[in-house]
Image (cartoon, helix red, strand yellow):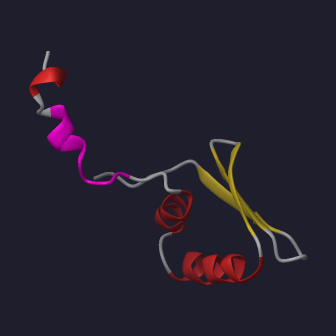
Amino acid sequence: MSNPNGFAYTASASGTVHITHHNRPATTLNGSRASRFIQEVTAGDPQLVMARWTGNYKRGNERTAREHPRNRR
């Protein structure tokens, strides 16, 4: 699985985090969720962390769906 890309985030002084994907708003985090996100993004791969927090990541069923008879061409 390739790493996701195109994610960016901005953190404001008020404790709000805005995550974008290809310059489009993906999600906004406030309070304790924003602080947990900042801890995770500084500790790991930022692109993977943002993909997980926004729900925009592969779930492992793509190969199964591709091999289904209805999807074969």
Query: Which one is in front, 58 or 48?
Result: 58
Q: Residue 35, relative to residue 57: is it above or below? A: below
Q: Is residue 63 above or below residue 49?
A: above
Q: Which residues are magenta?
A: 58-66
Looking at the image, how many numbered discs can be counted on the residues?
A: 0
Q: In the figure, is residue 4 to the left or right of 28?
A: left
What residue sits 71% from the left and 83% below the top?
32
Q: Percent position (x, y) of residue 40?
A: 55, 80
Residue 20 rendering spot, x and y as whole percentages: 67, 51
**Quarter holding the C terminus?**
top left
Q: Position of residue 63 (x, y in %)?
A: 18, 42
Q: Is residue 9 found inside the magenta-colored segment of the image?
A: no
| Left or right side of 57 for 5 | right
Q: Assess whether residue 61 is covered by the magenta stretch.
A: yes
Establish if 34 lies above or below 51.
Answer: below
Which residue, as the protein is rendered here, is positioned at the far top? 73
The single residue placed furthest to the front in the displayed view is 70
Q: Residue at x 90, y 76 (%)?
A: 14
Query: Residue 58's spot in the image, x, y percent?
Result: 35, 51
The residue lying toward the viewer, choosing from 25 and 5, is 25
* Residue under the image location 9 percent in, 25 percent down: 69
**Residue beneath the point at 57% across and 48% down:** 6
| 45 sits to left or right of 27 | left
